Image: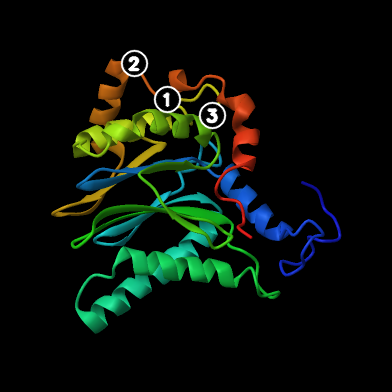
């Protein structure tokens, strides 16, 4: 991508019928740290890689609790994600105050998509440069996993991966998603860690410092598993000696081509 006369404002169409600033925002999602999600018949699990700007800094938080039954994993600009998370928390609180029940996740995600879309039609705003994986459990409809896009599109998935080097994790999920339906909570957590292991950059490895897992499900509130609580699962992963890396060793060369044809493109 390069600067041209059609990318100076989000409301300007290019001759090819594209909104370039929206595509730039989608590119920031692809450069964010990887986040994966999957659901079974009773639980939804999120996994995320945390980044630190240097060896002297702490790792950035990549999974945020919205309500007892909803949480998000983020890829892209963390500051934009915090702004959206604060709005989502307020929506859930307002709904619970007025109706006395938890807010249905489908309604919240639809409102979130509308919020994304409004920034693509107003010249004084820029698109949110963040993609979200929204994990939830509704008493009436069960577990859900949604993916949002800066263009305003939303999708519901059995399993998904977003962010940098996410193609390796996505390939692992595509190979195993049929077994997720009957998987237990611990099995889903292990699947998430295996998918994340293939998304680690360079010679790095998945550790309790840069890994983060969240679970929400039937009879369970949203919980975040990090640090010492995550270590037993990492030990189990190390004993298995596996991850997503062996599932797709050649994905680095195919990432650009795959992502260009991804379903996250702006629909016309």
Residue drawn 73% across the image and 57% down it? 20
Q: State the CA–CA distance, disc 3 to disc 2.
A: 18 Å
Give the image location of residue 201, x and y in percent.
54, 29
Q: Can residue 86 be seen in this view?
A: no
- Of 3 and 65, nearer the camera is 3
Q: Mark 1 points at which residue?
A: 244
Q: State the CA–CA distance, disc 1 to disc 2.
A: 11 Å
Residue drawn 20% across the image and 39% down it? 185
**Nearer-N-terminus badge (1/3):** 3
Give the image location of residue 13, x and y in percent.
77, 64
Left or right of 57: which side holds 120? right
Badge 2 marks a residue whose secondary structure is loop
Give the image location of residue 253, x and y in percent.
63, 25
Q: Residues within 10 Å of mark 2 (few under 14, many from 20)?
A: few
Which mark's residue is nearer the viewer, 1 or 2? 1
Left or right of 191: which side holds 101? left
- Residue 241's disc is 2
Q: State the CA–CA distance, disc 1 to disc 3.
A: 13 Å
- Of 98 and 268, nearer the camera is 268
Q: Name the residue under label 3.
A: 201
Q: How crowded is mark 3: few (under 14 residues within 10 Å), some or many (20 or more)?
A: few
**Nearer-N-terminus badge (3/2):** 3
Cβ–Cβ below 8 Å for labels 1 and 3?
Answer: no
Residue 5 lies in what quarter of the image?
bottom right
Residue drawn 46% across the image and 51% down it? 74
Cβ–Cβ below 8 Å for labels 1 and 2?
Answer: no
């Amino acid at each position: 991508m390069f600067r041209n006369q059609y990318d100076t404002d989000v409301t300007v169409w290019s001759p090819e019928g594209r909104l370039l600033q929206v595509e730039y925002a989608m590119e920031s999602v692809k450069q964010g740290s990887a986040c994966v999600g999957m659901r079974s018949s009773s639980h939804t699990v999120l996994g995320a890689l945390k980044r630190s700007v240097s060896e002297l800094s702490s790792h950035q938080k990549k999974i945020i609790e919205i309500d007892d039954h909803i949480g998000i994993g983020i890829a892209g600009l963390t500051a934009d994600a915090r702004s959206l998370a604060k709005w989502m928390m307020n929506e859930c609180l307002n709904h619970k105050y007025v109706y006395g029940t938890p807010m249905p996740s489908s309604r919240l995600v639809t409102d979130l998509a509308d919020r994304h879309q409004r920034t693509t039609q107003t010249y004084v705003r820029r698109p949110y440069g963040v993609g979200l994986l929204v994990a939830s459990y509704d008493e009436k409809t069960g577990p859900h996993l949604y993916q949002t896009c800066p263009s305003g599109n939303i999708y519901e998935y059995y399993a998904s991966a977003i962010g940098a080097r996410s193609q390796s994790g996505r390939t692992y999920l595509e190979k195993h998603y049929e077994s997720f339906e009957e998987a237990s909570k611990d099995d889903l957590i292990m699947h998430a860690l295996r998918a994340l292991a293939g998304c680690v950059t360079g010679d790095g490895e998945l550790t309790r410092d840069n890994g983060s897992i969240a679970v929400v499900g039937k009879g369970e509130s949203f919980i975040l598993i990090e640090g010492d609580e995550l270590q037993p699962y990492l030990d189990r992963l190390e004993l298995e000696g596996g991850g997503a890396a062996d599932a797709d060793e050649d994905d680095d060369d195919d990432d650009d081509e795959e992502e260009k044809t991804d379903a996250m493109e702006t629909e016309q």
